[in-house]
Amino acid sequence: MKKKKIIFNWKLNGNKYTIKCFINKVTYFIKENLEKINKNNIEILISPPIIYLDYVNNLLNNNVNIKLCSQNTDINYLGPFTGEISLKMLKDINVKYVIIGHSERKKFHNENKDIISKKFYISKISNIEPILCIGYEKNILNQIEDIINKYGINILYNTNIAYEPISSIGTGIIPSIDHINNINNMILNFLYKFDKNIKNNINILYGGSVSYKNVYNLIFKTNINGLLIGKSSTKIFDIIKIIKNIILI
Ligand code: PGA
């Protein structure tokens, strides 16, 4: 059975002090509830600002119950690319996942379809599992189609696609359960045309205004495989309440 990924994306928030408090509290809570977390097939990912990834890695101290996720990567492994970070560097500090093509990268950093496809591809072949965000554009299948056309359907095996409608990011408004299920089915039906087996080998996630108040319905009343959480991951008690509402304690 597939694990449901719960991804806490801190975006551009936090400092060494707050991050240490968060990690201490979250690791303690997870340790206390590990049986329930495992029983419910939940995998917890934390995505701090990149500069703190190694700090979090050290705080986690080989704790396998929380996985590290980067908010971005460059497409180059090394060389004259001032200000960038590479997948090799991320691997070096134990990062297992990377968010690709977040709508904020598109909006504020002009990331386009081509660059996002390349980032997705190079992450996958570098064995850092990509989480591809879609939902910024009108045709949400465009980005997936571009990846398939350039790199083939197999590149999508064991990866993640997060549907994040632009109208829901940071707004407090989430789509209906039916809408989320319909989008999920639409993505899977599209992929099925290329490969009949992909369905069981890819995770479709949802992101946008997830909170402890709506997490139960999102997890238990939809067919999604996980959640990408922004604002609610900046408050430690919201994180705890979100996990509690999924493992039902
Ligand atoms: P939000 O962000 O939870 O603050 O809406 C989600 C995201 O940007 O992935």
Image: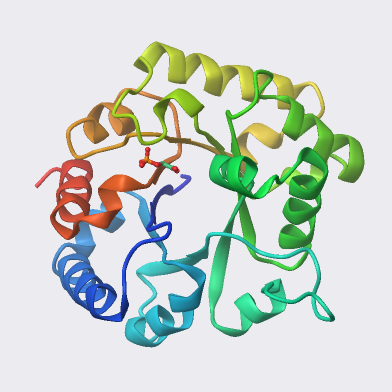
The answer, for residue 165, to whether it is visible in the render is no
> Horizontal placement of 216 versus 173: left or right?
left
- Tell me where residue 92 appears, x and y as whole percent: 62, 84
Quarter holding ligand 1: top left
Q: Nearer the viewer, residue 144 or 33?
A: 144
Residue displayed at 29% across by 29% down: 172
- Quarter-of-image position of residue 36: bottom left
- Tell me where residue 24 appears, x and y as whole percent: 20, 77
- Tell me where residue 118 appears, x and y as whole percent: 81, 52
The answer, for residue 12, to whether it is visible in the render is yes
Q: Is 117 above or below relative to 77?
A: above
Q: Is 199 above or below relative to 229?
A: above
- Quarter-of-image position of residue 17: bottom left
> Horizontal placement of 244 versus 120: left or right?
left
Residue displayed at 43% across by 26% down: 223
Q: Nearer the viewer, residue 139 or 96?
A: 139
Residue displayed at 90% across by 42% down: 150
- Tell me where residue 81 appears, x and y as whole percent: 79, 74
Q: Nearer the viewer, residue 67 or 1?
A: 67
Residue displayed at 34% across by 29% down: 171
Q: Is 169 above or below relative to 159?
A: above
